[in-house]
């Protein structure tokens, strides 16, 4: 395409001017407060057992104002109860410890977590119990689509289990006769491996994070079920289950030395000229049209290294661009810098070995947008300094054959620009740079966390509390 020869291009001298300082209040090495991810499940009541979730006792756990304990050094206690319909008092009470923010949240576990707590049984019921088991399952759950909208209530969900672990935590044959108060403690590791039909030789076997959003046709869910096998000629099993959330722990590589010094001393982050090892530069040169007239955009996008960013924190970014156009244009209004999430999840009942592209649910959404704090403009050239906020409720990056959660930084033109494509398959975005999202901070000093008001982005569509729809109780006669 041709560009008018009378266009004006002004270059900006880039000097070692640091990025603007952040609002630094708490730069300790501890992780930020993460809100627990929520999940929901339709309850199934039996003819003889009901369930109940009681309110949180402040003396038994941490308050909601404390940070989420991903390291497991402090715990929140969740109380679950199983009742018979003819009896108001529960015959089973389970106190489960997790790293959730509050007892009203769905229990939250991470890689390496120990599932622990204790079970209190009614004295008369203990004599009827032959064994108690704890089963943890990870499932792909598909919700059917009806009339263009997801409908999880009208049709049963199809599911396939990618992870399963069952441990006997008590049996009558090995029980202690001096068990005071009928309290049965339990402690077992959270599963860490995939089922054989979901694992691929030579690839990572780590578990994927929980993923459940209303706009997603497939969910990744985890559940815990306590099974109480009773004595008798016909084996009867009562179940008390709850949905839980799982987050893998990932730690990025350390920041560059100069960036660590800046964070430790609460200074501005050094730019790419002062710290070339701490930045990655991506150049671009794209042609387009504005109101039918030719325009040429070129410049460089600078992202901090390593390209793995901790959720709940701000990432410094810089954009330097020049626009060649016969019209008078403000270059800052031509670009939008986004953080986007691309999800691939295998549909349930599909064999992994025979999976095709159409057998995956795919969703690509914007999960963040850069806010420019400083603008230097000269003619049709501009330099933008700002931050890209990584929301604390984003799932960590995941790379599995049946479940992939990828992130990338996308520099896109504004709506007034019509990008000229040289090939039909060429994307509209000017720059697409893959990045990763982690759940932990790198070793060393921490960057400033986000100080703005709490926001609930549009892509967050989970329920906000542990309700009775998150619990399920059944009694089976086998």
Image (cartoon, rainbow, N blue to C red):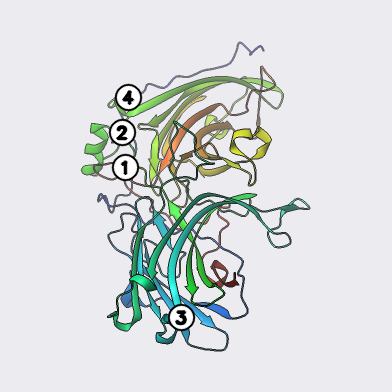
- Name the residue that disc number 4 marks: 15
- Farthest residue toward the front? 233
Counting residues from the start of the chain, the first of labels 3 and 4 encountered is 4
* Quarter holding residue 153: bottom right
For the point 53% across and 73% down, the residue is 238
**What distance separates the C-alpha of mark 2 from that of mark 4?**
9 Å
Image quarter for residue 356? top right
Circles 2, 1 touching at the beta carbon (< 8 Å):
yes
Disc with the residue nearer the chain's start (1 vs 4): 4
Rendering coords of residue 227 (x, y %): 48, 68
Mark 3 near mark 4, Cβ–Cβ under 8 Å?
A: no
Q: Is residue 149 above or below residue 175?
A: above
In this figure, which residue is indicated by the disc labeled 1? 21
Q: Is residue 358 left or right of residue 228?
A: right
Q: Residues within 10 Å of mark 2 (few under 14, many from 20)?
A: some
What residue does disc 2 label? Answer: 18
Helix, strand or loop for disc 2: loop
Where disc 3 sits, the SS reads loop
């Amino acid at each position: 395409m041709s560009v008018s020869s009378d266009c004006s291009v002004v270059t900006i001298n880039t000097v070692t001017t640091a990025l603007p300082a952040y609002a630094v209040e708490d730069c300790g090495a501890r992780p930020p407060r993460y809100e627990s991810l929520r999940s929901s499940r339709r309850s199934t009541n039996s003819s003889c057992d009901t369930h109940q979730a009681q309110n949180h006792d402040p003396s038994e756990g941490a308050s909601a104002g404390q940070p989420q304990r991903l390291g497991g050094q402090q715990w929140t206690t969740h109380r679950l109860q199983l009742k018979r319909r003819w009896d108001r008092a529960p015959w089973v009470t389970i106190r489960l410890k997790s790293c959730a923010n509050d007892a009203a949240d769905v229990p939250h576990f991470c890689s390496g977590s120990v599932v622990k707590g204790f079970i209190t049984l009614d004295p008369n019921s203990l004599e009827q119990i032959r064994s108690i088991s704890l089963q943890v399952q990870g499932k792909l759950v598909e919700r059917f689509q009806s009339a263009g909208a997801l409908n999880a209530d009208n049709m049963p969900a199809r599911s396939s289990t990618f992870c399963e672990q069952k441990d006997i935590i008590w049996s009558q044959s090995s029980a202690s006769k001096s068990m005071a108060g009928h309290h049965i403690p339990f402690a077992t590791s959270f599963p860490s491996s995939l089922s054989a039909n979901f694992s691929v030789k030579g690839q990572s076997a780590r578990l994927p994070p929980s993923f459940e959003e209303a706009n997603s046709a497939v969910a990744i869910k985890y559940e815990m079920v306590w099974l109480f096998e009773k004595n008798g000629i016909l084996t009867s099993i009562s179940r008390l289950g709850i949905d839980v959330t799982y987050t893998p722990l990932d730690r990025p590589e350390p920041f560059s030395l100069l960036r660590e010094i800046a964070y430790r001393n609460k200074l501005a982050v050094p730019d790419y000229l002062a710290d070339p090892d701490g930045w990655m530069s991506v150049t671009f040169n794209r042609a387009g049209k504005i109101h039918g007239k030719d325009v040429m955009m070129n410049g460089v996008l600078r992202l901090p290294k390593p390209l793995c960013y901790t959720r709940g924190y701000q990432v410094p970014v810089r954009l330097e661009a020049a626009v060649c156009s016969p019209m008078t244009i403000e270059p800052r209004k031509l670009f939008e810098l986004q953080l986007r999430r691309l999800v691939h999840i295998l549909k349930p009942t599909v064999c992994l070995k025979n999976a095709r592209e159409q057998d995956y649910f795919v969703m690509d959404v914007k999960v963040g947008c850069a806010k420019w704090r400083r603008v230097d403009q000269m003619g049709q050239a501009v330099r933008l300094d700002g931050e890209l906020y990584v929301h604390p409720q984003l799932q960590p990056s995941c790379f599995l054959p049946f479940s992939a959660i990828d992130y990338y930084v996308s520099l896109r033109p504004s709506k007034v620009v019509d990008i000229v494509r040289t090939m039909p398959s060429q994307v509209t975005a000017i720059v697409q740079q893959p990045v990763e999202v982690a759940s932990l901070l790198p070793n060393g000093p921490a960057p400033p966390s986000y100080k703005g008001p709490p926001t609930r982005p549009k892509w967050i569509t989970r329920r906000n509390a542990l309700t009775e729809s998150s619990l399920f109780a059944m009694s089976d006669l086998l």
